[in-house]
Image (spheres, helix red, strand yellow):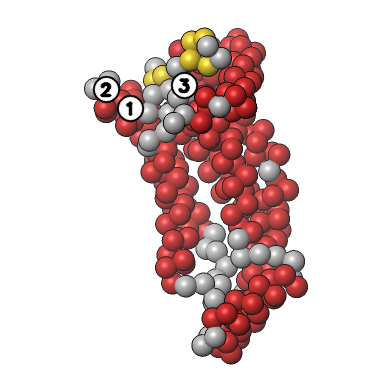
Amino acid sequence: MDLFTLPPLALLLDLATRALLALTTLLDPLAGTAAAALAVVVVTLAARLALIPVGVSQARAEQTRARLAPRLRALRERWGRTPERLQRETMRLYRDEGTSPLAGCLPVLAQAPVVGLLYAVFLHPTVGGQANPLLAHELLGVPLGRSLIGALSTGTTDAATLAVIGTLVAVVALVAEATRRLLRPASDPTAPAWMTGMVGTLHFTTAVVAAFVPVAAALYLAVTTVWTLAQRLLLRRRYPLPS
């Protein structure tokens, strides 16, 4: 079932398409055939600017978790054989310090509606009962609504499609590797080993997603991952982790 057939979501999809189309028209004298792609970049940057306070909150929470690591380790040593008590004491410590073990997920969760809406805009051939004009726009000759899996399934894969999508996926993957090397998360002694491993691979999941979503959504992911790395490097200097 397509959720965007529901009246509220259908209206949201129509409004988002109209807004993106208006921005594309505004940027057309500057970018020409790449106006819609530039509009996606502008929307991405606007979303990230709005989320700067969330990023600051994330940096503060990461700093706090690193500072609490010895106390968390002590709790684990004391209550490790009583999981219920360990969980209560851990959450009490986080609560007293005004943070949460899930605080680092806020930027990702906050962006989910934006990338989901972009995905929907470039996935629907018709919006509001009319043909979606945004699907006629391209990035370096590749339609913004094309995805790698779609091109492979329809036999429309060409060198331009592979080059554009491959470049976007490579950017996301390279930034993920840089993030893993430069911004190792503060360790949580109470976190199970499988969770630590999952956090380490989570960055690369975005690269996999970028290979399957429309080019417009992959462009959003590439821009937002680069922004995230730059922002976190700056905030790490402002809120350094204790040694």
Q: Secondary structure at mark 3?
A: loop
Crowdedness near tag 2: few (<14), some (14–19) or many (≥20) residues, C-alpha within 10 Å: few
The spot of residue 132 in percent (x, y) is 50, 14
Q: Which residue is mark 2?
A: 154
Q: Quadrant of the C terminus?
A: bottom right
- 7 vs 137: above or below: below
Badge 2 amino acid: Thr
Q: Quadrant of the N terminus?
A: top left
The spot of residue 153 in percent (x, y) is 26, 27
Mark 1, mark 3: which one is toward the viewer?
Answer: 3
Q: Secondary structure at mark 1?
A: helix
Q: Identify the image quadrant of residue 99.
A: bottom right
The residue sitting at the left extreme is 155
Q: Nearer the viewer, residue 15 or 73?
A: 15
Q: Identify the image quadrant of residue 223.
A: top right
**In the displayed structure, does residue 16 sit left or right of residue 221?**
right
The residue sitting at the bottom extreme is 78
Which tag, 1 or 3, sits closer to the chain's start? Answer: 3
Badge 1 amino acid: Gly
* Alpha-carbon span between mark 3 and mark 2: 17 Å
Which tag, 3 or 2, sits closer to the chain's start? Answer: 3
Regarding residue 138, the answer to whether it shows in the image is: no
Badge 3 amino acid: His
Regarding residue 225, the answer to whether it shows in the image is: yes
Residue at figure coordinates x 42%, y 38% from the top left: 210
Q: Nearer the viewer, residue 146 or 120?
A: 120
Q: Which residue is mark 3?
A: 124
- Residue 1: which numbered mark, if any? none
Crowdedness near tag 3: few (<14), some (14–19) or many (≥20) residues, C-alpha within 10 Å: some
Q: Which residue is mark 1?
A: 150
